[in-house]
Amino acid sequence: MSANQLEASKDSAGERLPAQVCRVEVVALRPCVDDGAWPVKRELGDELTVEADILVDGHDVLAGVLRYRLEGAAEPGWSEVALEALGNDVYGARVRLEHLGRLRFTVEAWVDSFAGARRGLAAKWKAGQDVEVELRGLARLITTMASHATGAEAAQLAAAALLIESGSAAMAERVDAALDDTLAACIERHPDRRLARRGPERVCVVEPVRARFSTWYEFFPRSTGADGRHGTLRDAEAMLAHAAQLGFDVVYLPPIHPIGMTYRKGRDNGLTAQPGEPGSPWAIGAPEGGHTAIHPELGTLDDFRHFVASARALGVDVALDIAFQASPDHPWIAQHPGWFMRRADGTLQYAENPPKKYQDVYPFDFECADWRGLWRALRDVFLFWAGEGVRVFRVDNPHTKPLPFWAWCLAETKQRYPDAIFLAEAFTRPKMMHALAKLGFSQSYTYFTWRNSADELRRYFEELSTPPVADFLRPNLWPTTPDILPEPLQFGGRPAFASRLILAATLGASYGLYGPAYETLAHEARPGSEEYADSEKYTLKSWDLERPDSLRHLIKRLNEIRRSQPALQRNDGLHFHRSEDPALLCYSKTTAGADAILVVVNLDPRHRHAGRVTLDLDALELSGAECLQVHELVGDSRQLWQGASNHVEIDPAAMPGMIYRVRRLGRSEHDFEYYL
Amino acid sequence: MSANQLEASKDSAGERLPAQVCRVEVVALRPCVDDGAWPVKRELGDELTVEADILVDGHDVLAGVLRYRLEGAAEPGWSEVALEALGNDVYGARVRLEHLGRLRFTVEAWVDSFAGARRGLAAKWKAGQDVEVELRGLARLITTMASHATGAEAAQLAAAALLIESGSAAMAERVDAALDDTLAACIERHPDRRLARRGPERVCVVEPVRARFSTWYEFFPRSTGADGRHGTLRDAEAMLAHAAQLGFDVVYLPPIHPIGMTYRKGRDNGLTAQPGEPGSPWAIGAPEGGHTAIHPELGTLDDFRHFVASARALGVDVALDIAFQASPDHPWIAQHPGWFMRRADGTLQYAENPPKKYQDVYPFDFECADWRGLWRALRDVFLFWAGEGVRVFRVDNPHTKPLPFWAWCLAETKQRYPDAIFLAEAFTRPKMMHALAKLGFSQSYTYFTWRNSADELRRYFEELSTPPVADFLRPNLWPTTPDILPEPLQFGGRPAFASRLILAATLGASYGLYGPAYETLAHEARPGSEEYADSEKYTLKSWDLERPDSLRHLIKRLNEIRRSQPALQRNDGLHFHRSEDPALLCYSKTTAGADAILVVVNLDPRHRHAGRVTLDLDALELSGAECLQVHELVGDSRQLWQGASNHVEIDPAAMPGMIYRVRRLGRSEHDFEYYL
């Protein structure tokens, strides 16, 4: 009983006696995010494992159930599955997640008097004690319980009670009847739950598998035109096919809306665009429309529909970039001037982070008098594109908009489209990133982009792959984005690109590439910054996808490996192993019923490194294995490893990482033959 | 906004819009036990440090307060103290705990528009930008805020606003006025908290310092008679003086109530007592009375009052043993037959753990029809003895009585006697021990009694000395009890007794001894058990407190050291240091404003051990110290140690542990002279 319950139950004498004596206590119901303030996240087809510490005084036996119910389901009732005692006062049960949406769950537990009396009888009988009184007590209990049953069961219970208390039957026969498993099973179906204790309700949000396991390819459709022309969505379908062919399942387009002319940015974020310069797609809004319109040079809404249909035919989702800000030419500025802040001189308040000013972008005033109208209009942007078949949204800078807005807006959208997925583009402070994930974003950009050393990577991914973080935040790993070209890639050459690619593809179940730039090893930055030189954000680019040193073959192979290896499709089951040479990062991914995957990456793009790695065989569920067969999946080679400790040598110029499928020798007939 | 808040605020359109836009989010308010379901524990005079993660979108500045209120206080309002930004979105504040009782606390935070605008102005002014519009905006803000102020303050604000927006004053003068600290302080006193976010309320139970730092001496008053006579409470006052002289501050008496005759236990837990045998004090109740009566052979209630008064004069608390069970002769069995369970044959249900039976003890039926009457009667036992001046209760086997009973009964008692302290005697499963501590027991017996190796001790005490456990469970360490004589003490000789004593006295802020037996090294057990041979539970004992190998001098010295060293009076600040020889356990205790204490104990009672210990100087707040002066407090010797790593040698036959006061060389004039 919590203190709150105590207070809610003052009895007539003014004392705070509880209303009834419920001796069972439910503690630490889990999984749980922030005391149950936010849902935990799982994916369709997963098993949700629920546990709680359940306590009762003395030696009584507890029974209980996991209760669960899909919010808004046609059948309003709760389903139940029996809790299992896991030892040390922990009880648990599992439920298969078969529907998208919000699953409410809790546990309920009670004292199982019959089980306790049965255990006592068995112990005394075994110790040779007289059990006459115990048998009579048990019979009395069964008679009471029979009153809850009907028909054949009631008759069965009554007959059992009669035999057990019968003075004429032999003692052994009566004891056998009392300890009979069929009797116990029958009684278990009619528990006395009047004094049951129910835990607090928790929520599990069930999202599509793609919320966890997804492979993103980002490109600017306007760069897909032939001979330097402005590309259209029709042109972009060739790039869509290219991405699908490389094994990507999400194609992500920067904003495709009309781009403002006022304060339009020029090349390299120049303050004024030259005539003919295309501007930044994030300066959203022009006379042609705002967040629900298509930039005329890209085509029409019909072209977009064709693009989405082509993507669907390839098994690819289209992800749109939702950036809630307006260019000075956005139609809403005239239609809803109250949605924007004004400065003391009456002019519109542009974005700023003093002393920096961004005159080309007006933020919305989420606290304005008509905030309800604004919030609904912004929600309707999601609903509009969802209506056009878009289910994946990359949300720009959510940390600069109110948290309660997102909680409401994402819930509203998911209520209508429970298969919608939202990626939070918040490269900001850790607690803000966590808050956004908790309140409903399905995926989050991460600090992976700046984690380079073995120790940094180990610590960060241990945090991401275990609760509490793993229960609410799903990482999506990006080696680069159009905004970020990290320094190691500016100077590390092709080996650095390949190494970061292998890390992203194997450390996280979701990863993404700023595709054409990454494939073609684009590495030139504006001096002293992480911005690309001549960034595609402000200009049209032409990428040479056919260049001989392109990474496309490695990307394709990695995506094939990810699709074939279930262990790489989850974020849990990650384990780091000891490595003699700190430049060689060694880790494994495992998941039930699938092969273990072991990855060794040389983090130094310039030098060959060699050393011994020592596997934690328990983590690989290969305890005691004397001989392992490892199948390197990138280069398709096979070796035998002797036990836990093995020599690895990696030349980054050839291939900076190894991805091994690890098995006990002789596991399948085929493999056995291979080594004979 | 939590999911619950979302649901509570459906607007007219049926959408779940919040009622207003509150952009601030309060997460993870701490300290906190089980999501705030239970209070945290602190002691009078402590500072309670409260922290929370507080988030807002964008670049706004947050302000906030810690709010606190003593339940039942004469002034019903909340006190507030400003939150400080600690970095990384963490905010905190401290409050000194000056009253016993339940302190409710929470935090409240809001966007500080003035601070944000002021920061922006300063940044732009520093960057040489035009700030005319900013000054006008700030003046407007001040004018709004002036409407909350009165009198001189209102005038001050109005004048400031006038100057800041004045077109005639120089720009620098206007900026100086806007950035003036007096103005900021005045505005800070009138924050706009209409859109503030308040965190959940938590409770901190403030108990006497003795709840944390106490030194217990347990003895059977009936064994204090001269020449083998049954001792009386008057005789026992000599033992009280003895305990006080050794430095104990709690004297704990096993039950002092009339002892039943029916099924009275004989020597060594014999099933039948011989005539004249005194029986077990835990078989409570006889025609002379029950839980509020005094066993006639011990004396009268007046004798008890005299005992309590004598204890008080010595600065010692009397702890009574509250064991809620009845002998077959307890008056309640006739007066309240409904308070006891009956077997199927109509006889009373004695205690049992099948196949074991305890016919001399009847448990109460906490779920009986008259459970309210029973619960009140049991609570009244505490209130009766509290009325006689008893403030410390050792509660027998609380884990065999319902948890909600304890939650209610302890709260009821503490409401009337907020200085009451309860020690839970539950040697049971860890989660049950935790639950009892959470629901209100002030102190808990621990597994220390069975933790012997360095690794066991380190892991267990790291758990006890850090949150979450340290926030709700206060350990009380007992090397032995009348129920438990652990094997290492049966066979380890005097060095084992001394070693376990030093560990208990220094690892925990509270420890206790089954005094006369421990002092005199009683080590004979019933074969194959942890029970004392000829246990004092069933007989009168005569202890030779003057024997030459008695531990009393060491006990006295240890208790003096505990009283003089604040670091030993707390459970936090414990740190284990590296030791070459695993038999030498090395740990330190530190607390703010006091000397660090370093303890090295030889865990092997039979052999001299020597080796190097390497101190973590950061943990000792002696980072970088090249030379340490260590003062060994048991033997009163001084040494100089060179840096972190030093050789230690301990002969257990002489003294199995060293307790060093550690200081940087030359800290005080006296010490400096000493070494010159």
Image: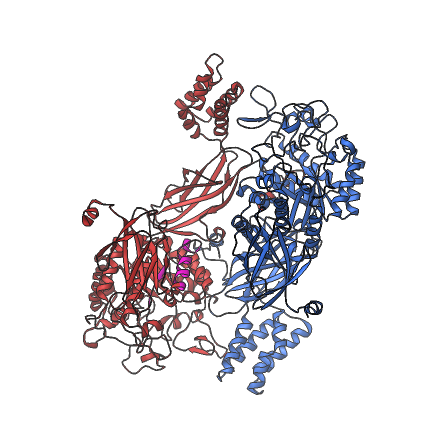
Chain colours: A blue, B red
Kindly give the residue lying farthest to the top in the view shown. B168
Instruction: Judge left or right: residue B128 versus residue A79.
Output: left
Range covered by the magenta-colored residues: B455-482
Above/below status of A552 relative to B634: above
Above/below status of A442 relative to B436: above
B467 and A3: which is toward the camera: B467
B72 and A45: which is toward the camera: A45
Q: Any magenta on residue B110? A: no
Residue A347 visible in the shown view: yes
Q: Position of residue B161 (x, y in %)?
A: 46, 20
Residue B283 visible in the shown view: no
Number of labelled discs? 0
Q: Position of residue B278 (x, y in %)?
A: 29, 77
Q: Quadrant of residue B330?
A: bottom left
Q: Quadrant of residue A434?
A: top right
Question: What residue is drawn where x is 19% and y is 49%?
Answer: B674
Q: Position of residue B514 (x, y in %)?
A: 29, 68
Q: Any magenta on residue B475? A: yes
B194 and B611: which is toward the camera: B611
Q: Position of residue B4 (x, y in %)?
A: 58, 46
* Quadrant, the N terminus of chain B: top right
